[in-house]
Every structure is written in structure tokens, then in C-alpha cells.
Amino acid sequence: TLFIRPELLSRWKDEAFLSSGELDLWGMNGRGDVCTGNSYYGCDRVGTATNLVNPIMSARLRTHKDFSFRYGRIEVRAKMPRGDWLWPAIWMLPHHWPYGPWPASGEIDIVESRGNDNYGDIGNQYGGSTLHWGPHWPFNFYGMTTAQYAANDGSFANSFHTWRVDWTNTNMEFYVDDALVLTVDPGTSFWDYSGLGDQYDNPWAAGDKMAP
């Protein structure tokens, strides 16, 4: 079992850093590839009095140089963390980005949750599975291919649960503890499913039905 333990940023930075310091993830591993993008200031954050640097630090496990696949089954057994400021996520991102930058080449969110005990209908009592896709930003049609669900024991932070994705050349099925929570079937193609029509370029024209 692999344990990823979030920690307070104040363990290695003083409290003043939250409102005045800069946290720059670019190049931290010497290769410049430690961060995947600048969206929502995800890679370089400067703290101010009204916009604090995130006070919790965690880790990311990457397999993009060790494992990739197209079509098949992936299964993850995990227990979500409990605590404020935590947003655990298990994703699959493209290895080669064949159809262009996000979200044109897709993103498979096996599960996302929150650590909060008291956060309404998005706290740790709930989880979500999603396929992100679209020809380019801001066209991301994830709202057509997402599902939210409740933990069968009250919270995904209480015990281990099993998430599964079955990905074939005709559809995708998402499961939680063997219960089907989401089916993604674009019909003829994701382009037709989007309903965008001919006024935009189709990045998946040369792909199969399940492209991206």
C-alpha cells in the first residue's frame, strides 16, 4: 500500500510565506517538467494578503514514462484523505497528446473527491468520475460525460474503495465498488456528440469513434 500524506506548508516555510512568498514548481526536478500547466496558477503561485499560497502540500505520482495504454481496464483501490484544503484526484492524461493540447486529446478522471467533512454535496462523502474532451479551450464538454455519487459507507475517507474504468473502442464505463456510475457512448463520434457543427475544425476527423 502506498501512502501519500499531505502536510502543512508551514512545516518548511514560515507562516508569512503564505501571504508574501512565491511557490514555483517549474524545474524543481531539474528537468522543467514537474508541472503540467499554468491553469489556475497551478505551477507558480505568489501569495498576497487576499490570495494565499495553498497552506497544504501534497505529492503527485506520475507513470507517464512507465505505463500507457489504449483500450482496456484500469482499477484503483484507494482511500481518500480527510481534511480541509485537500482535493485528491486520480487521472489519466494522454501520453503523446495526438489531437492537440488540453482538452483536445482528452482527460480521464477516474475519481476526484474533496477532503472536507463539512462541504455540502462536494465533501468527502461524495466523489466524481469524468471524461474531459473538446476541440480546444474553452470548449470542454465534460458536463455531458460526468457523474457524481455518494460513498456507500458515508465517506470516501472512511475506508478503501475500488474505482474501475472499462475502455473499449465503442464506449467507456466507470464503476465504484462494482456499481456502474457512468457510461460514455458518443454514438457516431465525439464530434457529432458535441453538436458543434461545421463552423469549427474537427481535431478528431482522422481518429476513430472514441477519439480523443
Image: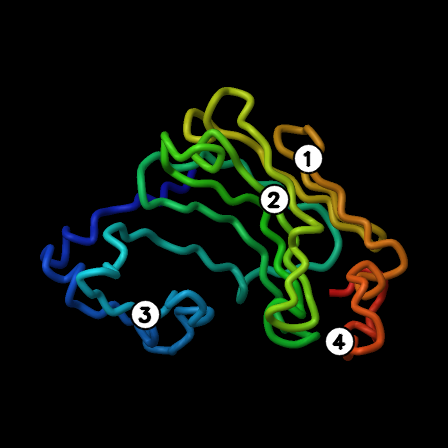
Q: Amino acid at mark 2?
A: Ser
Residue ID at (59%, 46%)? 110
The N terminus sits in image quarter = top left
SS at badge 3: loop
Q: Which of the marked residues, 2 or 4, is nearer the chain's N terminus?
A: 2
Residue ID at (41%, 42%)? 2
The C terminus sits in image quarter = bottom right
Q: Which of the marked residues, 1 or 3, is nearer the chain's N terminus?
A: 3
SS at badge 2: strand
SS at badge 1: strand
In the rendered image, the residue lying farthest to the right is: 188
Residue at the spot of label 2: 129
Q: CA distance from mark 4 to mark 3?
A: 31 Å
Between disc 4 and disc 3, the foreground one is 4
Q: Are marks 2 and 1 in contact (CB under 8 Å)?
A: yes
State left or right for residue 21 relative to residue 91. Answer: left
- The dot on residue 203 is 4
Q: Amino acid at mark 1?
A: Val
- Where residue 192 sits, quadrant-wise, is bottom right
SS at badge 4: loop
Q: CA distance from mark 1 to mark 4?
A: 29 Å
Residue at the spot of label 1: 181
Q: How is the image coloured?
A: rainbow
Q: Which of the marked residues, 1 or 4, is nearer the chain's N terminus?
A: 1
Between disc 1 and disc 3, the foreground one is 1
Q: Which of the marked residues, 4 or 3, is nearer the chain's N terminus?
A: 3
